[in-house]
Image (cartoon, rainbow, N blue to C red):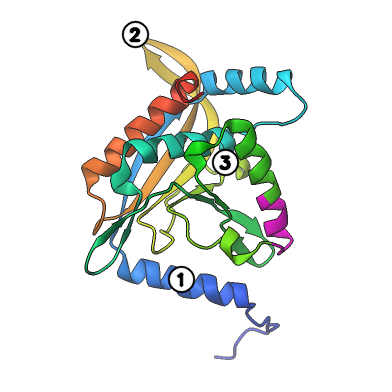
């Protein structure tokens, strides 16, 4: 059979790196996936309130997600680790990488010591990192390393998905869109904005109960956002 006509597009350096790292991850890391639904309504109203108070920042839902994840990593340090064949490396700082789509691939700029930063600081830093990331202007230390990754496709309307772990990290959280749907409260149906989050874990380093503890605590911060202020 003759091949369909095509135009050859050589791989960029970035595409080659993404391909090799993701292949390594899927072939060598035993992934398992845990999902939880988080109600967003309290967070959305707090965000609206905070954004109305100042023009210095405009908080996104993702800024709250980064802060909540940082708080939870402090509470569940068993996920803030790196796997090696001889030992677990317990990381001393909480550095959260955030996947950012760019032309020809993706990059994961890092919010260093995210648990030490307030929402406004996270917001300003994330906007700067994302902008420079898309322009290819990040320094290697701004996107290499990190102890945990967040991948949010909510802005594309994706309901839920499972992300591939970014080695040598042991977990990545995939965040879907907040969507209005019926929920049952006290035996009655109510409408809530619900966001599905799926944690992909490296089963060599993270057991199911540890991953579940992480997601339960994360849900708590998202649904009662004043607890992370």
Q: Are marks 2 and 1 in contact (CB under 8 Å)?
A: no
Q: Considering only order in the chain, which callout, 2 or 3, is on the residue closer to the N terminus?
A: 3
Image: magenta residue range: 129-137
Instruction: Specify the quadrant of the image occupied by residue 141.
Output: bottom right
Q: Quadrant of the N terminus?
A: bottom right
Instruction: Specify the quadrant of the image occupied by residue 143.
Output: bottom right
Q: Nearer the viewer, residue 93 or 197?
A: 93
* Nearest to viewer (mark 3 / mark 1): 1
Judged from the image, the secondary structure of the residue bearing numbered disc 1 is: helix
How far is the residue under mark 2 from the one under mark 1?
A: 47 Å
Which residue is under mark 1? 21
Q: Is residue 89 above or below residue 55?
A: below
Q: Is residue 213 above or below residue 104?
A: above
Which residue is under mark 2? 186
How far is the residue under mark 3 from the one under mark 1?
A: 24 Å
Residue drawn at the location 39% of the way across and 72% of the way down? 24
Graded by Cα atoms within 10 Å as few (under 14), some (14 to 19) or many (20 or more), the crowding at tag 2 reads few
Please identify the dominant SS of the magenta region. helix
Classify residue 164 as left or right of residue 216: right
Which residue is under mark 3? 154
Q: Quick one: which residue is furthest to the right in this view?
A: 55
Q: Considering only order in the chain, which callout, 1 or 3, is on the residue closer to the N terminus?
A: 1
Residue 79 is labelled as: none
Q: Considering only order in the chain, which callout, 1 or 2, is on the residue closer to the N terminus?
A: 1
């Amino acid at each position: 059979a003759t091949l369909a006509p095509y135009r050859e597009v050589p791989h960029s350096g970035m595409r080659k790196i993404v391909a090799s790292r993701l292949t390594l991850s899927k072939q060598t890391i035993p992934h398992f996936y845990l999902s939880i639904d988080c109600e967003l309504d309290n967070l959305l109203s707090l965000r609206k309130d905070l954004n109305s108070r100042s023009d210095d920042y405009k908080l996104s839902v993702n800024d709250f997600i980064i802060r909540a994840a940082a708080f939870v990593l402090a509470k569940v340090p068993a996920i803030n680790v790196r796997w090696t064949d001889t030992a677990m490396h317990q990381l001393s700082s909480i550095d959260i990488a955030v996947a950012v789509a760019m032309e020809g691939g993706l990059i994961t700029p890092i919010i260093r010591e995210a648990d030490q930063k307030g929402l406004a600081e996270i917001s300003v830093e994330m906007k700067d990192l994302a902008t420079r990331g898309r322009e290819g202007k990040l320094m290697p230390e701004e996107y290499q390393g990190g102890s945990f990754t967040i991948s949010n496709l909510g802005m594309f309307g994706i309901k839920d998905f499972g992300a591939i772990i970014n080695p040598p990290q042991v977990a990545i959280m995939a965040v879907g869109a907040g969507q209005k749907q019926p929920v049952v409260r006290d035996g009655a149906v109510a409408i809530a904005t619900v966001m599905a989050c799926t944690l992909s874990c490296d089963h060599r380093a993270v057991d199911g109960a540890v991953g579940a503890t992480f997601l339960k605590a994360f849900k708590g911060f998202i649904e009662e956002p004043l607890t992370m202020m």
